[in-house]
Image (tube, helix red, strand yellow):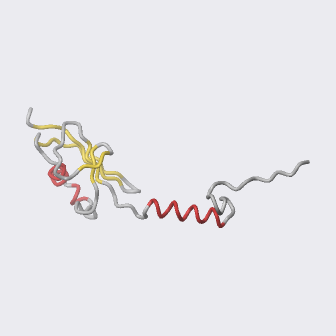
């Protein structure tokens, strides 16, 4: 079976993970493997025009060819922009006095001599 290779397709939700092992043709693309796996029927929320995909945590295009042992990962869209979330946490820390209002760093601790 030299013209077949073993690969996996993974998709994780907060509550559960789907990990499918399959055998596909050597020249299969990422998209072909995803479609062949049936995961799009199991998880209709997956939209390959929006969800990013990767192989072993490296983002790839849908037309990339798979190799033996590849794990194709389908990523969920981010709920919030990470930069925006960091900015909000920093502002909250400044408001609560946990960060210096000018530098954003930790405020200076003033120790009283006993």
Rendered image quadrant of residue 55: top left
Residue 113's spot in the image, x, y percent? 89, 48
Residue 64's spot in the image, x, y percent? 18, 47
The residue nearer to you, when weighing 93 against 71, is: 93
Q: Along the horizontal axis of the image, is 47 left or right of 106?
A: left
- In the rendered image, the quadrant that contains the N terminus is top left
Rendered image quadrant of residue 56: top left
The residue nearer to you, when weighing 84 against 16, is: 84
Q: Along the horizontal axis of the image, is 6 left or right of 59?
A: left
Residue 45 against residue 54 in the figure, above or below = below
Q: Name the outermost residue toward the right.
A: 114
Q: Along the horizontal axis of the image, is 29 left or right of 104?
A: left
Query: Residue at point 86% right, 52% down?
Result: 112
Query: Residue at point 64% right, 63% down?
Result: 94
The residue nearer to you, when weighing 59 against 7, is: 59
The residue nearer to you, when weighing 16 against 46, is: 46
Query: Residue at point 19% right, 54% down?
Result: 38
Residue 51's spot in the image, x, y percent? 28, 59
Query: Residue at point 22% right, 62% down?
Result: 49
Residue 64 against residue 103 in the figure, above or below = above
Q: Name the outermost residue toward the front.
A: 102
Residue 113 against residue 43 in the figure, above or below = above
Residue 41 against residue 65 in the figure, above or below = below
Q: Name the outermost residue toward the bottom.
A: 95
Residue 6's spot in the image, x, y percent? 19, 38
């Amino acid at each position: 079976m030299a013209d077949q290779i073993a690969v996996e397709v993974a998709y994780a939700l907060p509550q559960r993970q789907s990990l499918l092992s399959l055998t596909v043709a050597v020249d299969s693309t990422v998209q072909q493997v995803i479609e062949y796996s049936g995961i799009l029927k199991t998880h209709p929320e997956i939209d390959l025009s929006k969800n990013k995909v990767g192989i072993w945590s490296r983002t790839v295009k849908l037309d990339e060819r798979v190799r033996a042992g590849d794990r194709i990962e389908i990523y969920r869209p981010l709920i919030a922009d990470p930069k925006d979330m960091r900015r909000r946490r920093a502002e909250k820390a400044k408001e609560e006095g946990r960060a210096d209002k000018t530098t954003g760093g930790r405020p200076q601790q003033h120790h009283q001599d006993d």
